[in-house]
Amino acid sequence: MIGSKTDDNEWRMDNRKINNGGTDKIDNSRKGQRAVKKRTKEILDLLEQEYGTDYKCYLNHENAWQLLIATILSAQCTDARVNIVTKDLFQKYPAVSAFANADLKELEQDIHPTGFYHNKAKNIIACCRDLEVKFGGEVPGSLEDLTSLAGVGRKTANVIRGNIFHEPSVVVDTHVKRISKRLGLTKEEDPVKVEFDLMRELPKDRWILWNIHIIRLGRTICKAPTPNCAECFLQGVCIDYANREKAKKTLKKIPGKKKEAAKKTADEKKKAAGKTADKKEESSKEDGR
């Protein structure tokens, strides 16, 4: 059961394994060869039927360093807006060295539309200087090397590992965190713990596709704070949907004023939860915090 004391201990063990040698050492099943849970397999099959198996990165790039910078810019910003900014940005700064030697104030203005531009500009320059000095201008492939760079946390590192080096990795952005929890694959709030839960729950060869599928689902159907369950093809396997329907049936059995009071309380809780989630998302400085 995810979130239990036993799992918490296992998470700590997996955390040590990953920090010492990368995600290739994690055991993503209880006994190593355990079959994928029936409901998890149903979720994966439905996602594949709906979205296919093509690998797609939503950030436009032509090489590893462009994807690295685009991902840093994507913190607290939509991929669509980042793509608008990087279209001109990568023409103005055509190499890692150009970013490494960029004027801070000028770069801030160039990336201003992405938000948090002071911190992002500082991180991009520092990151590219490290690439030049420590890695010969090339983007490294290991989790340890990537997270040693300014502005690069596990999320950004896993984007690079999955899309550039094709290493199985789980990217926990706001969509993956929210929907994985709604589907019952994690009970955690911390992105790192969510990542480890998903690595244990999902087959390794589906980690990258999970990122792609869930991001698409989150943008089109399973939005925050209110999902469009009526159009969702995962209704039958969604824990959150089942709980919502159960709550509706319970509400129908409550007579008169008690029913109105119960509905009001439920609505207030839902509104408060939405505000809390939005507040957390706004205050978080993804990867560069």
Image (tube, rainbow, N blue to C red):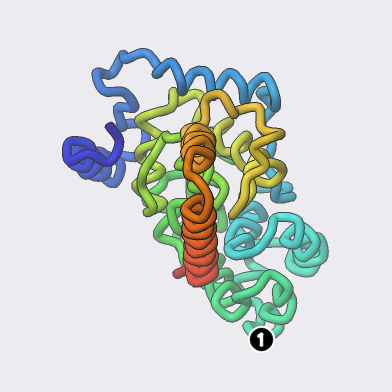
Foreground pick, 174 / 133: 174
* Residue found farthest to the bottom: 105
Q: What amino acid does circle 1 point to? A: Lys
Secondary element type, mark 1: helix
Q: From this viewpoint, is residue 112 visible?
A: yes
Q: In this view, does 261 lie to the left or right of 78?
A: left
Residue under circle 1? 105
Using the rendered view, name the quadrant where residue 52 is placed: top right
- Quadrant position of the C terminus in the picture: bottom left
Going 68% across and 78% down the picture, which residue do you hit? Answer: 107
Using the rendered view, name the quadrant where residue 23 is placed: top left
Q: Position of residue 175 (x, y in %)?
A: 57, 48
Q: Where is residue 46 in the image (x, y as percent from the top left)?
A: 61, 21
Q: Where is residue 194 in the image (x, y as percent from the top left)?
A: 39, 44
Foreground pick, 230 / 117: 230
**31 to 17, vertically: above or below:** above
Q: Where is residue 270 in the image (x, y as percent from the top left)?
A: 51, 57
Going 62% across and 34% down the picture, which residue do you hit? Answer: 213
- Quadrant position of the N terminus in the picture: top left
Q: From this viewpoint, is residue 167 visible?
A: no
Going 63% across and 77% down the picture, which residue do you hit? Answer: 117
Q: Is residue 22 left or right of residue 162?
A: left
Going 59% across and 54% down the picture, which residue do you hit? Answer: 225
Foreground pick, 226 / 115: 226
**189 to 24, vertically: above or below:** below
Q: How many marks?
A: 1
